[in-house]
């Protein structure tokens, strides 16, 4: 995946309830908040982390990082503050991640999630992610993949 192009950010998104949030690349000061949302951070220089901000607060984060898989694959990790779930912020973050990954030459986007995470799985299915494989004992985790289409203005 190519290095981030800062010209893409910041950008404003409008949530279902009319709230305006700003998407921007993570700053060093936001690293602890992002680590809390995602449970981890990509290795320095190994990807791109985009945050959603309402005023000075980090409300969501999405990380894209290259993974060793067939083709040019990118792993997507996403986290939202509970108060922002169900307001379409997650959808905005997913759409932005798809756009950025495709624009930077990725061929596939991979997401690992709990098989019990029905709302997230439904959102991924609406964006054409398909189950690729189960992960771990008891198949409680699943990897979903989306093939990216370069040059398309919509997806």
Image (cartoon, grey):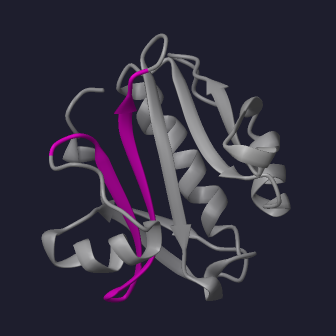
Whether residue 60 is visible, yes or no, is no
Which quadrant of the view contains residue 27? Answer: bottom left
Provide residue 84's location: percent of width, then percent of height: 62, 81
Is most of the magenta stretch helix, strand or loop?
Answer: strand
In the image, residue 143 lies in the stretch drawn in magenta? no
Total number of numbered discs in the rendering: 0
**Residue at (65%, 81%) from the top-left corner?**
18
Q: Is residue 20 left or right of residue 16?
A: left
Range covered by the magenta-colored residues: 45-68
**Residue at (58%, 17%) from the top-left corner?**
149
In the image, residue 62 lies in the stretch drawn in magenta? yes
Q: Is residue 130 above or below residue 61?
A: above
Q: Foreground: 110 or 153?
A: 110
Provide residue 90's location: percent of width, then percent of height: 62, 63
Of the 4 image quadrants, the one containing the N terminus is: top left
**Residue at (51%, 16%) from the top-left corner?**
150
**Residue at (32%, 62%) from the top-left corner?**
24
Provide residue 52's location: percent of width, then percent of height: 43, 70
Q: Is residue 103 above or below residue 10?
A: above
Which quadrant of the view contains residue 64? Answer: top left
Q: Is residue 106 above or below residue 6?
A: above
Of the 4 image quadrants, the one containing the C terminus is: top right
Residue ranking furthest to the top: 71
Q: Foreground: 149 or 8?
A: 149
Provide residue 67's location: percent of width, then percent of height: 39, 29
Whether residue 46 is visible, yes or no, is yes
Residue ranking furthest to the front: 137
């Amino acid at each position: 995946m190519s290095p981030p192009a800062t010209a893409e950010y910041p950008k404003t998104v409008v949530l279902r309830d009319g709230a305006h949030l700003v998407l921007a690349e993570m700053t060093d000061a936001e690293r602890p908040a992002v680590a809390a949302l995602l449970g981890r951070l990509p290795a320095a220089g190994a990807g791109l982390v985009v945050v959603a901000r309402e005023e000075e607060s980090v409300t969501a984060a999405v990380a894209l990082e290259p993974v060793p898989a067939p083709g040019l694959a990118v792993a997507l990790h996403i986290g939202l503050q509970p108060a922002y779930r169900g307001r379409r912020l997650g959808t905005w973050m997913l759409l932005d991640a798809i756009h950025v990954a495709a624009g930077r030459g990725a061929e596939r986007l991979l997401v690992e999630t709990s098989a019990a995470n029905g709302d997230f799985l439904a959102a991924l299915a609406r964006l054409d992610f398909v189950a690729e494989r189960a992960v771990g004992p008891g198949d409680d985790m699943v990897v979903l993949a989306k093939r990216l289409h370069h040059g398309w203005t919509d997806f």
